[in-house]
Image (cartoon, rainbow, N blue to C red):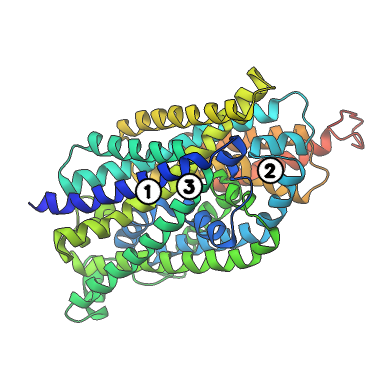
Amino acid sequence: MFNTFLLLPFAAYFCILLAIGIISHSKQKNSADFILGSRTLNCWLTAISAHASDMGPWLFMAFPAAIYIGGLSQVWIGFGLLAGMFLNWQLVATKLRIATEKYDSYTLSTFFERRFDDKSGMIRIITGITAVFFLTCYVSAGLIAVGGIFESVFTIDFYIGLTTACVVMLIYTFMGGFITVAWMDLFQAMFLLCMIIMVPVVAYLTLNDGWNTIESHAVANNISLNLLPDHSFTPIMTIIVLLFSWGLGYFGQPHIITKFMGINDPSDMYVAKYIGMTWQVAALAAAVAVGLIAIAYFPSPLPNPELVFVEMTKTLFHPLAAGFVLCGVLAASMSTMDSQILVSASVLSEDFYKHMFKKEASPKELLAVTRIGVLIISAFSLFFAINRNSTILEAVLYAWSGLGCAFGPLVLMSLYYRGANKFGAMAGIFSGGAIAGTWDLVNPYLFDIAIPAMIPGFFISLFSIFFVSRLTSENCSLGFSLRS
């Protein structure tokens, strides 16, 4: 009976998502509609969908777990995210929207190719392969989270749960495209925000002595409730690492910055920025509250800390109500994965099929290919998720670092440095992506402490773009005369 009550809200939620996808199906006439909604998003859709695409299951599972285990010093991850996203709005959003329209680009790959006048197609190929690889890893992390929810909540087999969620998401993304995903993200973002605020409030009210109870349990479990545990070198370095390892990644996340590209009027970006940042502050604060309250709410450590929100919800509410609350975790997962799948599919159609196989493809043909791309990316993500060989935080950080290192520096340089050329662009993508993909293997041989891939990868990529562009410039003092 318990599982039946819990399952009803999830079934209803899936039906709503499928209904929205079916209704939106007839509105997609060509690939421009499907990939970027023909740039018709308003400021609310742009703001909320960009931030919803960012947070994902990480918000409900990995971040509260980090606070629950590591204490309040882990909140610097949140500060890094807020700073990174604010700078993304400030430095990238408006300029990228204007530039991508100028170059008639619907994907980052096409934008880079046209911005640097690359006739060889190498930038597009390198960008496309890198984006698809890391985005597929990202989607698989979300599927792992969903499978864990079904396994924990319903005692349904992990593989059946993640496959079910993948099929539902595939159907509405396949049928609806960019506009549908944006509206889904808006609906799911507001829903998940209500859920993640409500649960810690109710949980806190059940504690006998409020904050004092949290403090006493934290002391008993040797968990620090200080933002800065002490003033020694190690915690300060840890904070710097937490800030940079997440904040720098924002500039290169295709599933986030494509939402900037889809806004109707670039002048609305200012309003969208503050709408989105308000949502993010509230969501992150609520996630921190979940982790802190869990220290006292669960006197005995949980076997899987990443399920702290799920377990808290199950014990607080009637199974039927708990089912609706836990749909918030599902909403967070879906709102990230659908955007990532759509971006990957658009790369397959716009950057590979159109340029490599059929340059004169009709709009309807490209639309069909993009939808086939949705199927392909979903299938590969499901395959990777089935292996279940990492935690959600590890999988998300790996993909986040890969995208951030490969594309973030180039996005900034393409918008702000006129001297950047195609050789520098290729060097930046390759060096950033390679370092992010292999850093965990190399780090132990170079440093005694774990340094996230984002820090060396981002700055080496940035340096590579600048140095190689200068080296291959026709005005280079070294005598090179290669043109970009």
> Quarter of the image holding residue 461?
top right
Give the residue drawn at x 37%, y 30%.
Answer: 384
Q: Which amino acid does label 1 sit on?
A: Ser
Which quarter shows the C terminus? top right
Of labels 2 and 3, earlier in sequence is 3
Query: Circle 2 — which element?
Result: helix
Q: Which amino acid does label 2 sit on?
A: Leu
Observer-nearest of 147 and 388: 147
Asked whether disc 2 touches disc 3, contact meaning CB atoms under 8 Å apart, the reply is no
315 vs 113: above or below: below
Kindly report the distance in space between the C-alpha atoms of the residues bearing marks 2 and 3: 29 Å
103 vs 276: above or below: above
Observer-nearest of 388 and 155: 155
Asked whether disc 2 touches disc 1, contact meaning CB atoms under 8 Å apart, the reply is no
The residue carrying pointer 1 sits among few (fewer than 14), some (14 to 19) or many (20 or more) residues within 10 Å by Cα, namely: many
Give the residue drawn at x 54%, y 26%.
Answer: 369
Does 257 sit left or right of 237 as displayed? Answer: right
Looking at the rendered structure, which numbered label has been put on residue 333?
1
Q: Position of residue 2 (x, y in %)?
A: 10, 53
Of labels 1 and 3, earlier in sequence is 3
Kindly report the distance in space between the C-alpha atoms of the residues bearing marks 2 and 1: 28 Å
Q: Mark 2 highlights which residue?
A: 410
Q: Where is residue 473 in the image (x, y as percent from the top left)?
A: 86, 35
Residue 340 makes an appearance in the image:
yes
Nearest-to-viewer mark from 2 and 1? 1
Q: Mark 3 highlights which residue?
A: 180
